[in-house]
Image (spheres, rainbow, N blue to C red):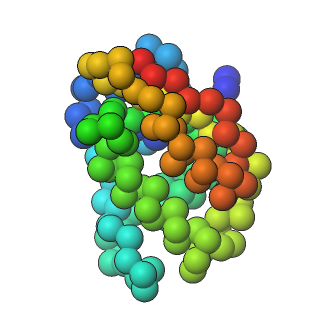
Amino acid sequence: MSNKVIINGSHRADGDTSLLIQKIYPNQPTLNLIEYKIELYNYDEKYSSDDEFLDMINQILNYDTIVIATPVYWYSMSSLMKIFFDRLTDLIGSKKEIGRQLMGKKLQVITSSNGNNLGDSFFLPFIETAHYLHLEYVDGKHY
């Protein structure tokens, strides 16, 4: 068994991105962002007790490879995925001890859309975030 976790940024549980995940990574643990309450990033890094971002990160820490799966909306990642990525800021701010545990993990990205017009620049936020957090960016593939 591979030591991968999939983070699904789709707004639809049965959408194309979910079908892609099932096809490429059957039987892999998947965390569906739509099922978690992740509050918007704020500069104070203070969130309600309902916020589940750190719960999700603590699950992710159990894996060596993180696969980001997102539909392409308006030439970018989904809004759910963007919120998740914004919250990674907490891991270099008030939660550094948790953020450091991500160092050395691998990051892969898969995307889905109806068109085939995705440029290489789409993957730049993922590549740069991986470098910033000291993750190993493996690759990005569009389907």
> Vertically, is 40 above or below 114?
below
Q: At x 37% / y 42%, what residue is drawn?
A: 77
How many numbered badges does the structure rendering display? Answer: 0
Q: Position of residue 65 (x, y in %)?
A: 65, 38
Residue 86 at what x, y percent from top left? Answer: 44, 62
Q: Position of residue 134 (x, y in %)?
A: 72, 54
Q: Residue at x 52, y 68 (%)?
A: 89
Q: Residue at x 26, y 32 (%)?
A: 13
Give the vertical position of 110 relative to 92 (above or below).
above
Q: Where on the picture, by quarter, is residue 70?
A: top left
Residue 129 in view of the camera:
yes
> Can you say whether 19 is above or below 71 in the image?
above
Residue 137 in which image quadrant:
top right
In which quadrant is the C terminus drawn?
top left
Residue placed most toward the observer, 64 or 128:
128
Q: Position of residue 64 (x, y in %)?
A: 70, 41
Compared across the picture, whether 140 is left or right of 76 comes to right
Q: Quadrant of residue 117?
A: top left
Residue lying at the far top in this picture: please name it: 23
